[in-house]
């Protein structure tokens, strides 16, 4: 910025006046009613203006208090509704958690019944263990099928990933090709646009020159303002200006003045803003833009004899207050409805997760107990332990099934 300022200050010493930036007026916009009322009171501190400012401040205070009251009431109501919804949700979740608890107990009881039956058959009929360890064989078979299934799923995932990668490569290549084609098409359009613009400029210039020549043939000096304007529009060169001026019988000084006028129009790109919009340069201008109900209150206080100022203030303020209250009521109802629907969604999700939770519990329980049962069957089949030792081992497995992790209580 400092570099730009330095260069600009140097440029100002050599540049012509018509090439400089135009000056700007200082426009001070008063957008708030309290500032507007204070301005009027400072400018003309009479009783009515001071009363109007006091009315503005009082209404501002009342508005802030009323808005805070409405916002606070909304928050309190939402908090109470939220607490009721949460209480109802927790009451409904009792059934869900009870169902999950009962399902886990059923898993444990089924595993206990199954293992008790298995241990009883092994301990009371040991001669059948070697010939038919059916449970153990099924367990091994089950693990193999799971591994095979996992391998198939892994292969399918890799195949899908390869397909996706190929699809992305094809899409990227297509996008690159489309971008290149679009770029070539855009470049062709720009070239045609430049050609068309050049043709238009040439045709426009030829038409202007034809009009200027027609005026020059008449040689009427009353047409000079129009001719000068036309010369400015085509940025005519000095040679052509001299040629046209001679047909009007102008002196060299007059021709030089026209040439300077055309050159000035060519180099001037800035214009002063209209006074009605931009204000007067080097002067401070205040103006206001009031669009709140406090402004209508001010008008009513300043002009009490006109009843319509009162009617407008009462109508606008009442509609604004009702609209504000209605909006917050609708927002509060919407928030409560969303809370209720979210609670229903949470409850439905927990209900659907009960079976998943039970299946997860069962899977983990089996992963902890099945290796012990597997080891029990191996020791029973090879005769490494006595019947009393196997019975003690079986009791430990049943105790682990009942009390070991994962636990029913979460």
Image (cartoon, rainbow, N blue to C red):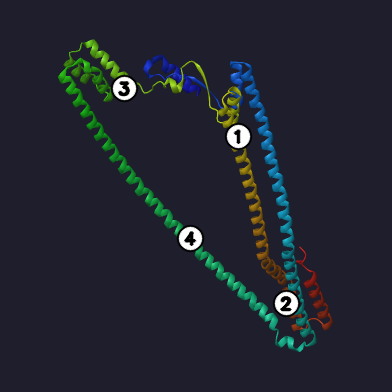
Front position among marks 1 and 4: 1
Q: Which mark is residue 330?
A: none
Residues 317 and 111: in front is: 317
Which residue corresponds to mark 3?
266
Q: Which mark is residue 374?
A: 2
Q: Nearer the viewer, residue 129 or 214?
A: 214
Residue 6 versus residue 107 in the image, above or below: above
Pointer 1 or 4: first along the chain: 4
Q: Secondary structure at mark 2?
A: helix
Query: Mark 4, residues whose alpha carbon is within 10 Å: few (<14), some, or many (≥20)?
Result: few
C-alpha gap between disc 1 and disc 2: 83 Å
Q: Is residue 153 left or right of residue 235?
A: right
Specify which label sits upstream in the sequence, 3 or 4: 4
Q: Are marks 4 and 2 in contact (CB under 8 Å)?
A: no
Which of discs 1 and 2 lies nearer the camera? The answer is 1
Per the rendering, the mark at residue 164 is 4
Q: Which element type, helix, strand or loop, lies under badge 4? A: helix
Q: Which residue is at 30% across, 19% downward?
A: 263
Report x, y in % for residue 396. 81, 74
Q: Pointer 3: residues within 10 angstroms few (<14), some, or many (20+)?
A: some
Q: Quadrant of residue 369?
A: bottom right
Q: Residues within 10 Å of mark 2 (few under 14, many from 20)?
A: some
Name above or below for residue 361 compared with residue 116: above
CB under 8 Å between discs 1 and 2: no
SS at circle 3:
helix
Regarding mark 1 in the picture, which secondary structure is present there? helix
Sequence-wise, which precedes: disc 4 or disc 2? 4
């Amino acid at each position: 910025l400092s570099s730009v300022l330095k260069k600009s200050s140097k440029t100002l010493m050599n540049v012509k006046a018509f090439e400089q930036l135009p000056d700007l007026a200082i426009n001070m916009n008063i957008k708030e009613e309290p500032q507007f009322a204070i301005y009027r009171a400072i400018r003309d501190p009479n009783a009515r203006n001071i009363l109007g400012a006091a009315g503005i401040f009082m209404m501002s205070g009342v508005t802030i208090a009323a808005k805070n009251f409405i916002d606070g009431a909304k928050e309190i109501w939402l908090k109470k509704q939220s607490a009721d919804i949460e209480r109802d949700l927790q009451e409904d979740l009792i059934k869900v958690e009870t169902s999950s608890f009962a399902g886990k107990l059923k898993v444990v009881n089924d595993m206990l019944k199954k293992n008790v039956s298995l241990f009883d058959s092994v301990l009371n009929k040991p001669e059948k263990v070697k010939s038919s360890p059916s449970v153990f064989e099924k367990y091994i078979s089950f693990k193999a099928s799971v591994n095979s299934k996992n391998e198939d799923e892994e292969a399918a995932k890799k195949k899908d990933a390869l397909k996706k990668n190929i699809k992305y490569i094809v899409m990227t290549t297509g996008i690159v090709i489309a971008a290149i084609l679009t770029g070539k098409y855009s470049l062709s359009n720009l070239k045609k646009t430049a050609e068309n613009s050049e043709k238009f400029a040439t045709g426009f210039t030829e038409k202007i020159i034809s009009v200027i020549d027609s005026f020059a043939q008449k040689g009427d000096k009353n047409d000079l303002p129009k001719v000068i304007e036309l010369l400015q529009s085509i940025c005519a060169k000095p040679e052509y200006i001299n040629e046209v001026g001679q047909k009007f019988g102008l002196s060299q000084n007059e021709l030089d003045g026209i040439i300077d006028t055309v050159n000035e129009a060519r180099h001037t790109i800035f214009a002063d803003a209209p006074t009605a919009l931009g204000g007067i340069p080097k002067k401070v201008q205040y103006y206001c833009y009031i669009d709140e109900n406090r402004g209508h209150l001010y008008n009513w206080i300043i002009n009490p004899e006109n009843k319509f100022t009162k009617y407008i203030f009462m109508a606008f303020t009442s509609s604004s207050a009702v609209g504000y209250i209605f909006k917050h009521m609708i927002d509060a109802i919407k928030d409560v409805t969303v809370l209720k629907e979210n609670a229903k969604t949470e409850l439905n999700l927990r209900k659907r997760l009960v079976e998943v939770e039970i299946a997860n519990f069962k899977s983990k329980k089996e992963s902890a107990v099945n290796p012990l049962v597997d080891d029990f069957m191996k020791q029973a089949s090879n005769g490494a332990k006595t019947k009393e030792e196997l019975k003690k081992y079986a009791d430990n497995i049943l105790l682990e099934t009942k009390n070991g992790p994962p636990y029913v209580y979460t």
